[in-house]
Amino acid sequence: MKSLPIRIKITMWFTAAILVVIFFTYFIVFHVHHQIIQKTIRDNLIETVEHNVDEVEYYTNIEQPVASNETDYIRIYQNGYLEIDDDFLDQVNEVYTTLYNADMDFIYGENPIPGQSVEVDFADAKVQQVRVNGVLYYIFDRKLTAEGLKGLWLRGIVSEHQGADHMSDVIRLSLFFLPILAVFSAAGGYLLTKKMLSPIQAISGSASQIGSGNDLGRRIDLGPGEDELHQLAETFNEMFRRLEQSFEAERQFTSDVSHELRTPVSVILAQCEFSLEEQRSSEEYELALQTIKRQGRKMSRMICDMLDFTRLEMRTDSYVCEQVDMTELVESVCSDMALIQENGITLRCETENGICLHGNRELMTRLLTNLIGNAYRYGKENGHILVCLKRNGKEIELSVTDNGIGISKEDQTKIFRRFYQADSSRSGNGAGLGLSMVEQITKFHGGSIRLESEPGKGSVFILTFSDIL
């Protein structure tokens, strides 16, 4: 059972449910219909007799009933005439109606009881039963009270077999059609289940192809739709997208590490080979060790920066977010970095009071430090840097402006890439991760960053955050 396909299991369950319904239907038809039919017969008997009470009228003059309806039956009764509607004499739904006097003398009508030898006392508005030759008959009497009709009784008689033929036909049709209905329901349920589960097969097939072919760029396409299976497919696509990003980030990280570490490793190996080729002076050994130390520190900084960047990008570390006083943070960072005074560049800070942001203080400090450090690195001699923090409607706007060498249009589209340096001659000890880190920290805090720059006139980095406390 466990190895059967889901569509077979659902079809089996659906078919079993249909068979249970059919079984109970048969049970009701065979065991309950008798009571229902007998009640229906009694109700029909009472209704027919009550209706026919008004079909018997008394007239003192023969001309009155003849003028009213020539087709009615007319009979002499006492000092007048009885007019009996001819429709009254017909059996209605196998109910027979008979007219008697108080002495049970038959006046008119039809009695279905064989021989009419069975006498049952009159009982006004009461259903009585009598069994003759094994057949049960229901009897219902009404005493006529209209003018001239006193002493007359209207009796309705019906057999318990009334409607039996119709019920037999219903039973035969049920025995024939219900099994056919079960077969068609099972077949329809199977086809419907197969159609409903076909998207799952598509999802399974696509996932299998992605897994076997290592093609994380492949997506599950079920066409338009918003049901649960389409939502499941979209969830899988989102999972594949994130996996693709993770593997791409890992691949890119490995490639970047290999590329960026190649130069310092080569320098270190060259210095070691140079020192070991022959006997060197103490000054040459010292110079080689200083070079190795410098390249080693560069490698260490680069690895730390790359690990921090990757952790931030992939959210592998938990950064505690709290209320950060951005006014105090910006003023503190600018106060410290103004002491650099590299190439005569001055740093000025303009802030509005009471600006707070829900975020991580360490990351925001690093963001601002990277931006200011980048402005120093690419600034002009005796230039200036302006850091501005202000409110712009419901947003926080942080900008760093310099009058340095600027960035070309071509480089502006690449400046936030990892390890990209627009002017490698002025990169200093940087590894090209500063602006990439700034972008990731900005995204982490739900903000956005844009660059406005013109070669020879300087650059301005504008960061916008919407989380104001």
Image (spheres, rainbow, N blue to C red):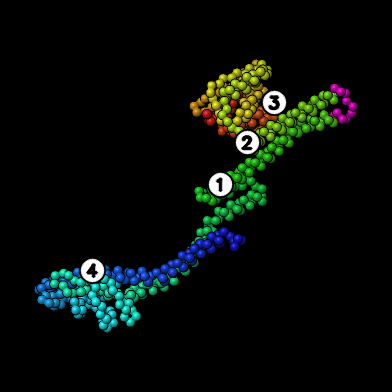
Residue drawn where x is 60% and y is 45% of the image: 239
Q: Residue under circle 4? A: 51
Q: Is the residue marked by circle 3 packed among few (<14), some (14-19), or many (20+) residues within 10 Å?
A: some
Q: Is residue 269 left or right of residue 34?
A: right
Q: Amino acid at mark 2?
A: Ser
- The amino acid beneath tag 4 is His
Q: Nearer the viewer, mark 1 or mark 3?
A: 1
The mark lying in front, picked from 1 and 2, is 2
Q: Amino acid at mark 1?
A: Glu
Mark in the foreground, 2 or 3: 2
Residue type, mark 3 in image: Ser
Q: Is residue 231 magenta?
A: no
Distance of label 2 from label 3 (alpha carbons): 31 Å
- Residue under label 1: 234
* Secondary element type, mark 1: helix
Above/below status of 176 relative to 461 = below
**Tag of residue 318:** 2
Residue 320 visible? The answer is yes
Disc on res. 427? 3
Residue segment shown in magenta: 274-283
Residue 199 vs residue 427: left or right? left
Q: CA distance from mark 1 to mark 2?
A: 27 Å
Do we see residue 455 in this rendering? Answer: no
Q: CA distance from mark 1 to mark 4?
A: 70 Å
